[in-house]
Amino acid sequence: MQKRPYFRNSITELEAIYSLNASDRSILILLSKELMHRNTPKAKALLQKVDKSLIGDGPVSPPTPSIPRKIEPDASARVAIECGHCGESNFVSVLPDIVQHLSCAHCRTSYEALYKHGVMRSKFAQKPANSSSGIPPWVWVLLAAAAVAAIYVFK
């Protein structure tokens, strides 16, 4: 399990998690641990609320039965997608119902990303077959120069 499961969540998302899980002690503990790493005024205020809920002074009440509301991401929300070929993380903007055509910043493999129904889906293109033998191009230039020199020497 990840040490900080809420590391990539914004403070707005953490506030929503708190409001939806105010009586779930395990989630409150994870929130408290995450908020201890944050220094913004909103994070400090939420940490105080979470800590009060944990010690029993806060508004810990059983959740009211309601239909969960969909939390729409804000315009600046981004998620990390791990490249299917090189494993590098790439940050993708959360744009609901829009197919984004992107490429990995490290290996340039193209992929598509689609955020739909609260889930980011990605589809990586097949990695092109590498026609070279894995030898750097400068080695081929050096070998060609050596071959040309050998032809002139042994004429």
Image (tube, helix red, strand yellow):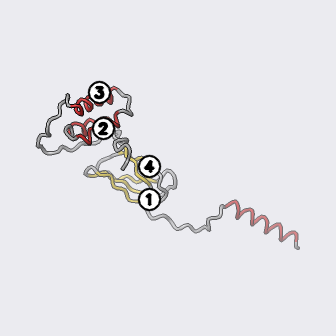
The CA span between labels 1 and 3 is: 39 Å
The image's mark for residue 90 is 4
Please tell me whether mark 3 or mark 2 is closer to you in this view.
2
Q: Earlier in the sequence, mark 4 or mark 2?
A: 2
State the residue at coordinates (26%, 38%): 28
The image's mark for residue 45 is 3
Q: Earlier in the sequence, mark 3 or mark 2?
A: 2
Please tell me whether mark 1 or mark 3 is closer to you in this view.
3
Residue bearing mark 2: 31
Residue bearing mark 1: 84
Whether pointer 1 and pointer 4 mark residues with C-beta atoms closer than 8 Å, the reply is no
Q: Amino acid at mark 4?
A: Asn
State the residue at coordinates (75%, 66%): 144
Q: Amino acid at mark 3?
A: Ala
Q: Residues within 10 Å of mark 3 (few under 14, many from 20)?
A: few
Q: Position of residue 143 (x, y in %)?
A: 75, 66
Q: Secondary structure at mark 3?
A: helix
Q: Observer-nearest residue: 152 or 126?
A: 126
